[in-house]
Image (cartoon, helix red, strand yellow):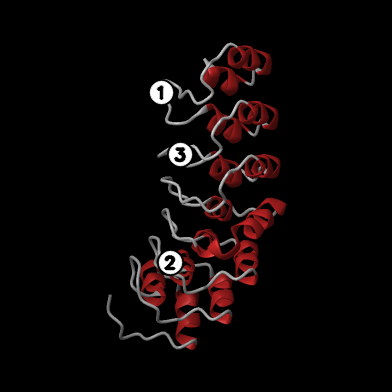
Amino acid sequence: SVTSAVARGHIDTLQLLLSHGANVESIGMFEDRTALHIAADNGNEAIAKILLDYNADPNAQSVEWGTPLGIASYSDNEAIVKLLIEYGAKVNTISASEHGTALCAAASNGSHSASICYLVEKAGDDIHAVGGFYGTALQAASSRGYLYTVALLLHNGASPNEEGGRCGTALQAAAYHGYLDVVNLLLGKGAKVNQRGGLYDTALQAAAFQGHTEVVELLLKHGANVHLQG
């Protein structure tokens, strides 16, 4: 009943249920997420605050959805991101979802607003945290071709050579998807052109596999080794 009220945005009903002892951590019959996950997904700050005031866990984990903070970060809802952190959400938690961390979730959606800047600030040294499908936040942004976000993460200390995720490195991820401007930026910031790992072993092999000729040319100009075999 709590999750139903939250899903439909019925604030008065929610408050009535909670005031009569309804479980704030209840999970819907057909869902793997709490009421707070739903509020974060819907972008309903008022309901999220009510749930948190009733001690909803801001770090609740869902296999499919990750954490409420991860959901809010992916949706680029700065107000809920800040609210959750204010109530104790851990920025660097690596969730079971495909996004791994909240910062990775935001980066994979190309957030240009203050929310990703806020998460970068809160992440601190854990900007390199590895988890989820993409590995790191930098790899997530590189995989999606979000040049602004890639530049922001690099400016704030993200390593272009951090390993993890499906494509191994940010350079391989960008090369595989054919994002020439991202590849160029990463190389300019010290990405190792022949670094090995990931599904395609090297950035050159990833670009060649996908037929991204311009990316292949750029990698070769930066010393990519055509003789490396994955």
> In the rendered image, which residue does mark 1 sit on?
30
Neighbour tally class for label 1: few under 14, some 14-19, many 20 plus, Cα within 10 Å: few
Secondary element at image label 2: helix
Which quadrant of the figure has residue 62? top left
Q: Report whether 124 appears left or right of 63.
A: right
Q: Where is residue 223 in the image (x, y as percent from the top left)?
A: 45, 88
Which quadrant of the figure has residue 229? bottom left
Label 3 or label 1, whichever comes before in sequence order = 1
Which is more foreground, mark 3 or mark 2? 3
Q: Which mark is on residue 216?
A: none
* Spatial separation of the CA atoms under disc 3 and disc 1: 16 Å
The quarter of the picture where the C terminus appears is bottom left
Residue located at (46% from left, 51% from top): 94
Label 3 with label 2: CB-CB less than 8 Å: no
Residue located at (63% from left, 56% from top): 122
Q: Which mark is on residue 176?
A: 2
223 shown above or below 137: below
Q: Which amino acid does label 3 sit on?
A: Gln
Residue located at (45% from left, 39% from top): 61
Q: Which amino acid does label 1 sit on?
A: Phe
Q: Is residue 198 or residue 86 the one in the foreground?
A: 86
Secondary element at image label 1: loop
Label 2 or label 1, whichever comes before in sequence order = 1
Q: Is residue 219 or residue 12 the one in the foreground?
A: 12
Residue located at (53% from left, 60% from top): 137
Label 3 or label 2, whichever comes before in sequence order = 3
Q: Position of residue 78 (x, y in %)?
A: 69, 45
Q: Which mark is on residue 61?
A: 3
